[in-house]
Structures are given as C-alpha cells and as structure tokens.
Image (cartoon, helix red, strand yellow):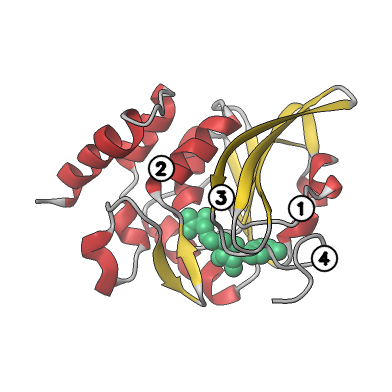
Amino acid sequence: MDFETERYRMVDTQLKKRGISDFRVLEAMRKVPRHRFIPPELRSSAYEDRPLSIGEEQTISQPYMVALMTECLRLDSEDAVLEVGTGSGYQTAILAELAEKVYTIEIHESLSEKAREILTDLGYTNVAFRVGDGSKGWEEESPFNGIIVTAGSPDIPSILESQLSDGGRLVIPVGSRFVQTLFTITRVGKSLQKREFTSCVFVPLVGEYGWREI
Ligand code: SAH
C-alpha cells in the first residue's frame, strides 16, 4: 500500500470515525506526509494509530491526538499560532496548513534543526522556529489566536494565558508526569473559560513553568 492510500485510510478510520469533523483539519491531515517526519526505520508504521519515537526520548503524537488538539484550536487562515514542543515538526506542518503564521519552540536543538529541514524541504514558509524553554511562551510575538502545548504540564502556566488574544484558545495537557487531561482555555475579554476534554499521555513539559527537573 502506498503512503497516500494509508493516509486517507488513517483519516477515515482513526479520525472521522472517532468524531473529528472539522473539514479543514481533515483536509490538512490528508495532505501532510506524516511519514516524512518519522525516522526511516519506523516509517512503515507512520500511519498507525499510535505515537512513535523520534529520538531524544521524545515522540510524535498519535494522529488522533494531533487532529483533536488542532480541532480544539479552531484556527482560521488569518490566525497566528504558537506551538510549544516542535518535536518532529508534524503538528507544526498541520498548523502551517491552517493558520497564517506559526511560531514554534523546541527545547532540544537537534529536534528543532531536523524539523526545520523537513518543513523547509516541504515548502512551508510561514513557520518561525526558536530553540529554548517554551513554557514561558514567546512574549515578543504575542498575542496569539491559538497556543498549543504538545507536552504534559503540571498546571496551566498563567504566562501562556496572558499571551492569548481576546477570543484566543490555549490547548494543553495538564496532570501528572504519566497521565494528563486535555484542557482548552478560551480568553473572553478579561475572563478565561476552561473546558475539559479526554485523558491523554504526553512526555513532560520541562522548564520554568513546567516540570522543574527531568
Ligand atoms: N508536536 C510534536 C510532539 C513532540 S513531543 C510532534 O508532533 O512531533 C513534545 C516535545 O516537547 C518534545 O520534543 C520535547 O522536547 C518538547 N518540550 C518539552 N518541554 C519543552 C519546553 N519547555 N519548551 C519547548 N519544548 C519542550
């Protein structure tokens, strides 16, 4: 089976069947070649229903989790979005399909470099990369219409909430090191509306407003 056929099947069986319905999200998941973000030895598993290892003890998230978090962001084509945890760059590519500009921060330089190479090679020109601690956000480029944290946090960093525009959405897994709950926080003027989604498992968000030690 070729990768494109596998990708279309992934969208039907793993995403649509489980309730992902945002047309633009489904289109982006059909378009972005997930296998390109996966080390060659694991590439044949690229479209399986699970996370995969990408080196530095980090993982590329399960396709369903990428789609669900992206749907929660409700991006439109004029939005600026911040991603904390570039990792493989796969989620970054999905965001780059849907928003006007993506700002992405990764704490491991080697992962950021690799992601940048792949995204450049695929022709994405609307992504800005930074190496460092994304638990603090990216103050100079704020406010953002969306912020997505793709690592598990002990709580919701208020510094990230403060970088949301009015109407902006923050999507973040919060909980222990081993299991978290996915939250969406929407800024409405000065107030913040919190909504709880499914439970999930992410690698830890390390840094000043995440877990202090690994
Ligand atoms: N979105 C990624 C998921 C990567 S896993 C993908 O689809 O591939 C989470 C990533 O968050 C890891 O690469 C990890 O190194 C990174 N990370 C952890 N804490 C961080 C922090 N404080 N700032 C930026 N990146 C962080």
Mark 1: amino acid: Gly
Residue 180 versus residue 40 in the image, above or below: above
* Disc 3 crowd, CA 10 A, few/some/many (<14, 14-19, 20+): many
Q: CA distance from mark 2 to mark 1?
A: 25 Å
* Earlier sequence position, callout 2 versus callout 1: 2
Query: Which mark is nearer the camera, 4 or 1?
Result: 4
Residue holding disc 2? 64
Q: Mark 3 falls on what kind of element?
A: strand
* Earlier sequence position, callout 4 versus callout 1: 1
Residue holding disc 4? 208
Ligand 1 sits in which quadrant? bottom right
Q: Mark 4 falls on what kind of element?
A: loop
Q: Are marks 1 and 3 in contact (CB under 8 Å)?
A: no
Position in image of residue 192 (x %, y %):
82, 29
Q: Are marks 4 and 2 in contact (CB under 8 Å)?
A: no
* Disc 4 crowd, CA 10 A, few/some/many (<14, 14-19, 20+): few
Q: Are marks 4 and 1 in contact (CB under 8 Å)?
A: no
Residue holding disc 3? 127
